[in-house]
Amino acid sequence: MEIDFDKMQGLAPAVIQDAATEELLMVGFMSREALETTLRTGFVTFYSRTRKTLWTKGETSGNRLVVMAAWTDCDRDTLLLRVHVLGAGKVCHTGSKSCFTQELPLGEANLCVAEEARR
Amino acid sequence: MEIDFDKMQGLAPAVIQDAATEELLMVGFMSREALETTLRTGFVTFYSRTRKTLWTKGETSGNRLVVMAAWTDCDRDTLLLRVHVLGAGKVCHTGSKSCFTQELPLGEANLCVAEEARR
């Protein structure tokens, strides 16, 4: 399947989800080469926008991410990788499992519609 | 909390996850204004890169996304919105719940390490 890397100058966002717990772990970017490397080796490999090079997640920490399933979306411009985390299971460089640890405050109207949705 | 919109020329990827089922529904992009609108109103609002304007997801279909919780990651350059889907619950314009419906084939070595990880 052909992924559309043109919308982001050669990159596509890659969402990393824990295949067992469904937890959102991190988002990185993949070039065509990064995706090919990921699906060939089975270890999530991103393209670093700052270092301008491929990097296999966990290559130094040991917390490598094994691809259990890979998906693309209706526009074929975004990737979803469902993974199994090796090593200590801490995906974020801050030492937490997920990179998404900072909660944003919701506005008053948002709290109200969220409360309604909960009923 | 200050989100870093500079890495993507004023945008940040926004991952949309079903708060109840944990399913990955879609990925869109938010500008600062889109994020502010989202958190103020409680309805997920993206910035359309093609139309160059804000759009509230589901404004025509009725499948609006109520924000139940919002998070950012360690780099503060990516957003995670955990949502409740209103209407018929079909988030994707193709009529499916999630936009991630196209599975990518894994290479031989990937299948092998995934099988090992499953044990």
Image (cartoon, coloured by chain):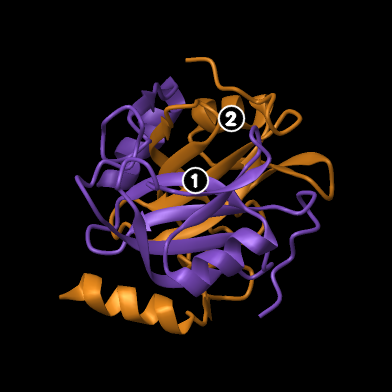
Chain colours: A orange, B purple
**What is the distance, in whole Å, between disc 2 and disc 1 at their CAs?**
18 Å
The image shows residue B1 at horizontal and vertical percentages of 66, 80
Q: Nearer the viewer, residue B6 or A46?
A: B6
The image shows residue B38 at horizontal and vertical percentages of 51, 65
Q: Which residue is mark 2?
A: A35
**Which quadrant holds the C terminus of chain A?**
bottom left
Question: Which label is found at residue B27?
Answer: 1
Residue at 43% x, 48% y: name it.
B57
Q: Amino acid at mark 1?
A: Val
The image shows residue A9 at horizontal and vertical percentages of 76, 30
Residue at 51% x, 82% y: name it.
A105
Q: Residues within 10 Å of mark 2 (few under 14, many from 20)?
A: many
**Of helix, strand and loop, which one carries label 2?**
helix
Viewed as shown, does residue B106 lie left or right of A62? left
Is residue A68 visible from the viewing direction of this image? yes
Q: Nearer the viewer, residue A20 or A88?
A: A20
Q: Residue furthest left?
A: A119
Viewed as shown, does residue B107 lie left or right of B49? left
Residue at 32% x, 74% y: name it.
A113
Residue at 36% x, 25% y: name it.
B102
Q: Residue furthest front?
A: B60
Q: Chain of mark 1?
A: B
Viewed as shown, does residue B97 lie left or right of B10? left
Q: Residues within 10 Å of mark 1 (few under 14, many from 20)?
A: many
